[in-house]
Amino acid sequence: MKDFTAYLNETEEIGFVEQVADAIIHVSGLPKAKPDEIVVFETGEFGQVFSVQPSYVEILVFSKKQVKPGIRVTRTNEVLKVPVGYELLGRVIDPLGKSISGIKPLKTPSEKRPIDTPAAGIVKRRSVTKPFETGILLVDLAIPLGHGQRELIVGDRKTGKTSFLTRTILNQTRRGNICVYAAIGKKKLDVKKIEEFFAQNGVLDKMVILASSSEDSTGVIYLTPYTAMTISEYFRDEGKDVLLVLDDLSSHARFYREISLLGKRFPGRNSYPSDIFYTHARLMERAGNFITEKGEASITCLTVAEATQGDLSGYIETNLMSMTDGHLYFDKDLFYLGRRPAINPFLSVTRVGRQTQTQLRRDINREIMSFLSLYEKMQSFIHFGAELNESVKATLATGEMIIHFFNQAINEVVPINLQIMAFSMLWSNLWRGHDTAVIRKQLHQILEAYNSDKKFREKIDKLAESDSFNKLLRVLKVEGPQIIKAVSQKYGN
């Protein structure tokens, strides 16, 4: 950007700071100021026009440095733009596009884009038809997602939401897709841990980490999800499938509430401003599945919201549910029971994910959900103990095996074809009579074989192309024991 004097000579308009209320500043003068226009202070700070009133202009400032009354201000005739490009991959940047970490220095991209643009119209959109793989057994098999889907990740604090997101990013980057992770108002230590995790797993060069910390100004934190979406749109226009993670919009709503109250906006429910729904909806509408000049591409948006005491009826949570294509609910009660991930499949929803599935995956999904429902009902019979009949005992035993099957280690990512095969082997009773430790060990051996043995991987992938679940089960009754025996002999140590 140019300096204060250059912009003053261009616009020939000057204003003066009259009142300062943290991130909101009242400026007199500037008669031609427009909403969202960038203004520059003579001290070097800059901000954005938040609203235009008859006698003053409200400015949202992007600096923590205190702006004093009487300081001169001038317009720029520009809106806020951020740098976008492949140069951002592997970097940790702030919402203004400046590097705040990273092993290598940031080479500033030549292209810049406005951070607040209208969502693409229906002519440029396509139906969600391509399955999105998270690498998480429970999600991919029971609550499937699609490329271009907007899914809410909701649950109490410390219930495994971030762990789920990092594994999903890990899986998508390994599949060659671009990932943008937006940390909204997080601690710097938490952002550093996330950066180190992806660097250790060798995928940092395929993603962008956009971070604002709790130490930043409220204005900068407010910009975070919009900048992240703008960067995602650049890669989408390059023909890439993009995963965008917004962590989290509950914090973003609180910071926007603070800005609105400082600006003397009339408070509504829970003191949030009346336009909080619009603020998030216009952001979420920019994600989806699109047709671009370089072919079909998508922005899959995983939006995080924090619930309180397992309450899904909170204002921000219900707002986000209504503007997304489903939600994954992380249940604190399941977390305390040791479930990892602690996703409640009965309180989770996917509105478009199932339309992306093959017939085989639909069959498996139907079997899983119907059996889990039966298993939950049977739980009430456990206290009968020895009086249970064999049918109920068999259902409870199978249910325990499936629950343990869905438990995953914190860094474990399982390809979808292997998920299909492993569940089918479990469902066909190939592990009947084995304890969970033995089953878990053999599953790890199969995963190791799939990742390291090309011939074995091709065999599993071919089996996973079966027309139906019943057909696959018939094949596995013959080949399943052979697969387990071969893998145990080769990877048993």
Image (spheres, rainbow, N blue to C red):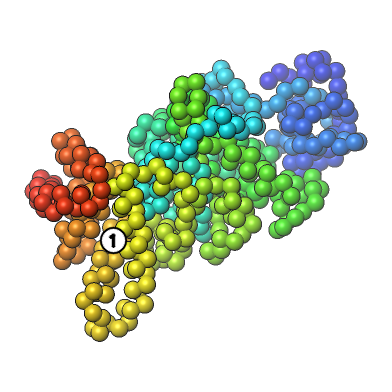
Which picture quadrant has residue 170?
Answer: top left
Task: Name the amino acid, label 1.
Answer: Ile
Nearer-the-camera pick, 108 or 478 = 478
Nearer-the-camera pick, 105 or 52 = 52
> Residue 95 at x, y = what percent?
60, 34
- Position of 446 with respect to 123 (left or right) is left
Say which residue appears at 34% left-offset and 53% top-offset: 365
- Position of 416 with respect to 62 (left or right) is left
Is there any visible trace of residue 75 in the rendered image? Answer: yes
> Residue 450 at x, y = what percent?
21, 41
Question: Callout 1 environment at 10 Å: few (<14), some (14 to 19), or many (20+)?
Answer: some
Which picture quadrant has residue 23?
Answer: top right
Say which residue appears at 56% left-offset and 17% top-offset: 110
Q: How many marks?
A: 1
Question: Which residue is denoted by mark 1 in the rendering?
Answer: 402
Nearer-the-camera pick, 68 or 76 = 76
